[in-house]
Image (cartoon, helix red, strand yellow):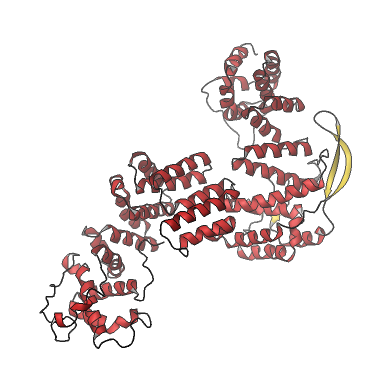
Amino acid sequence: MHPFEPDDEPLQLESLLQDAAREIFRVEDFESFSQWLRQNFDTYCAPGMFDEGLAPGTVEALTGHLAREIWQFMPLPGNHFKPRPLPKLKPNDPCACGSGAKFKQCCQRLTGNFSLTLESEQVWVFAIPALQEFGLLEKAVASRRVPLEGLLEAAIALFDQNQLRKSAALLEPMVALEQASKSGSLHDYALNLLCNCYDALGFHRKKRALLDTLVEQAPKSILRGGAWQRLACILMDEGDDKAAWQAFQRAQRDTPHSDSLGVLEIQLLMAGGRLSEIPPRAEFWRRQLLRAGLHKDDPQVDLLKGFMEDPVGMMLQLSGAEELLELYRWIVQQQSTEVPPYQLEELPPIEGPDGQPAPAAMLIAPAASKSVRSRWAKVCPLYPPFDSVGHGFEELDPWEPELFDRWMGVLSRYPTAWNDIDILDDLAALLLDEQFWGDSAAQQLLERVLRRSRAIIAASVAEDTQLPWVIAENRPALRALMRLVTLLNDTGRKAQAVELSEWILRLNAEDNHGLRWELMDAYLKGGRDKDALTLAQLYDGDIAPQTRYGKVLALFRLGDLAGAEAAVRDAHTDLPYVARYLCLKRIRQPELDEFGITLGGEDQAWFYRDDMRATWDATEGALDWLKKLARSLP
């Protein structure tokens, strides 16, 4: 919201003051301005502003009084941007309305009833557009007579005209460190606008340096609280949820009554996938604003009400992502439909990692899906996927309006698309488009799509049945589950990610994509050493440090030092660099290949160290034990 937006009143005061400034600057003559106001005053009045039956000359008296009041405070370019006040009327002076009567016998009684109670700072706000129109803005700023309100208005005008460097130059002194102790809402608005300038200019380091300076060196103040809020947004976008929440809490301590804290907390909750917590928090902040005196129809209050009712939809509306909003509404309409089980075509049993045969199957879509799938294939701009990441895009943007309308039209006409794992697989790929990276609302849509696939799989597949990845028809289902694991990890829901990973390994024990490695690390980081040992034993022939050295650490923690030593010697044969990379506190990064890793190479050892050395170091005595043992390794 513009910081100087006036309340709705019968008199269009903002327009009147802006036009008055333009007229005054045109000639800088009071009599000419007063005549102009008398002639044009009715254009700024709402119909019926004055009741019928007013005494003759009332409107003339009012315009005369308003002309004097506006003139009193208007900075005149011809007077070095200072006002040139008129002499104060004495009771026996001729009245300014031109009636010929004395002031005390004419308009004196009106001055209290129709006073604008203007101040010099307010008038400057409305003078800025006129100064810019006459090419006098830079001269006015250079005069050093423009108050904070006027400078901020000038910065807004320059920003709107894409003169970003000039706008930033005006704003930077307003948010300097020495301003913090006396800062108010205008300084906070200036900080927000300056950050927008820096973003548009690509000055991201400069923006971060400014915010870091304010939060580290400024005293408790509105300006520091605003800096903490913006820093929380940056940290949230970087995926550092813990630091983002800490910044939010510091902002709360600095500015507990800030109107923007509620929306910031909602953004953080959504980014962390904590959707169920948003409605009650939105209700809390809405009540806070109402207690602070805001009306129920205030935009901020209404916004929070929207988050209480539909957090994702409200976030999409705010972002202006019309295509995402349309897709979201379609998903919401389908979510309550019954989950249809797929048919299973039995396959020959396959050998699991434990050497035992296990039943295997291929997913067969319901017959009703064939028609919608063929129509979808004609409009979906994706290449057929081959791996767990999957999907390539054609050269055209699938979210470009014409293409979007084509594939969204199929979804709208055929709601049963929500029951087809292949189409859900494509929708997930569309939502993983790089333009939505870091978009918490798009992430919510993605999660709903992936969870629908999970629900279909759970309704179709028995606990002991495997869905081999080598069967192409099973890949969309397994890919959906893999993507859901990634999403859960990215949003800090590690326990859910571990539980889902365990199920995926039961479904596809071959684990063609190394999910067992992430699961092993999660077990060890979570202190689940017995589970880690069991997993390592299932994949005993694995040539990966996660399983081989994960087994070592699990055995060491469980007190089986002899078994741990044997595991190290066995692992060292295939992974000769891992022990050394783990033991050294500092080690130079080896040359990395952008196309992959070398099995048993230094690059593989480096990546394992980077992820797991802290876990080894946190295990008392583990690294010292490994160092001693490493001396005897070939």
In this rendering, the answer to whether 35 lies above or below 344 is: below
Q: Is any part of residue 514 visible from this angle?
A: no
In this rendering, the answer to whether 206 lies above or below 30 is: above
Count of numbered circles in the view = 0
Residue 58, position as x, y percentages in the image: 25, 84
Q: What residue do we see at 76% from left, 60% from top?
A: 416
Q: Is any part of residue 591 visible from this angle?
A: yes
Query: Closer to the camera, 117 or 324?
Result: 117
Query: Closer to the camera, 64 or 400?
Result: 64
Quadrant into which the N terminus falls = bottom left
Query: Closer to the camera, 97 or 319?
Result: 97
Q: What residue do we see at 70% from left, 40% from top?
A: 500
Residue 460, position as x, y percentages in the image: 81, 47
Q: Is residue 451 left or right of residue 62?
A: right
Q: Is residue 396 left or right of residue 90?
A: right
Q: What residue do we see at 77% from left, 50% from top?
A: 456
Quadrant into which the C terminus falls = top right
Residue at the farthest top position: 632
Residue 374, position as x, y percentages in the image: 78, 60
